[in-house]
Amino acid sequence: MPTIMTHTIIAGSGGLLFQKKREPVKFWIITVLCSVIADADVVGFRLGIEYNSFWGHRGFFHSLFFALLFAFICALLFFREHVLFSRKWWRYMLFFSILGASHSITDAFTSGGYGIALLSPFDTTRYFFPFTPIEVAPISIRKFLSCQGIRVMASEIICIWLPIFIFGFWPRIAKKARIA
Ligand SMILES: [Zn+2]
């Protein structure tokens, strides 16, 4: 997996680009939750669930279906002020789904561990993209605080943080600078 920091950066940046007016705190909490919830499946290691099983790490909870399901539940429970299936409601639903999916998709670009069950529960095959430039983050914190951690952060900054800045924020900053 990319680190929790990178998933949070994706969430925060996505939220900033998404919001038209100031969004409430619950929006930001759900935004971050949607982008990191998949990794809650690491508790499976403690519960004796096999890594490569249906419920294992990077299994069902990393699927696009689960991303959609979780986004639906969040939009349903926490955005009741918008009429169900209205245009505004769909905007939130879609945004949270994309964030959830971003977790699984970025994981599929990592260089280690088992692949991601992107299409679970319909197809439990674990997938990687053919190109995996992101160093996989170690699950143990001790390993993360080593040279391996530095390599992981460097690959995430180059492959994720920089493109987000260049394509997401730089055009806005440049536009504001031109107007000012
Ligand atoms: Zn993950």
Image (cartoon, rainbow, N blue to C red):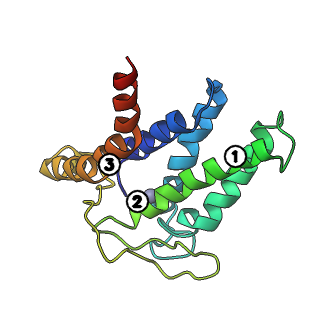
Mark 1 is surrounded, within 10 Å at the Cα level, by few (under 14), some (14 to 19) or many (20 or more) other residues, namely some
Q: What number is the disc on residue 106?
A: 2
Judge from the rendering whether residue 89 lies leftward or rightward of residue 58; answer left or right: right
Mark 2 is surrounded, within 10 Å at the Cα level, by few (under 14), some (14 to 19) or many (20 or more) other residues, namely many
Q: Whole-percent x and y of residue 107? A: 40, 62
User: Mark 2: which amino acid?
Assistant: Thr
User: Mark 1: which amino acid?
Assistant: Arg
Q: What number is the disc on residue 165?
A: none
Marks 1 and 3, how far apart in space?
24 Å
Residue name at image x 66 percent, y 59 percent: 68
Mark 3 is surrounded, within 10 Å at the Cα level, by few (under 14), some (14 to 19) or many (20 or more) other residues, namely few
Marks 2 and 3, how far apart in space?
13 Å
Judge from the rendering whether residue 159 lies leftward or rightward of residue 31; answer left or right: left
Marks 1 and 2, how far apart in space?
22 Å
The earlier-in-sequence mark between 2 and 3 is 2
According to the image, label 3 marks what residue? 163
Q: Quadrant of residue 79?
A: top right
- Which type of secondary structure does the marked residue at label 2 adopt? helix
Nearer to us in this view, 21 or 75: 21
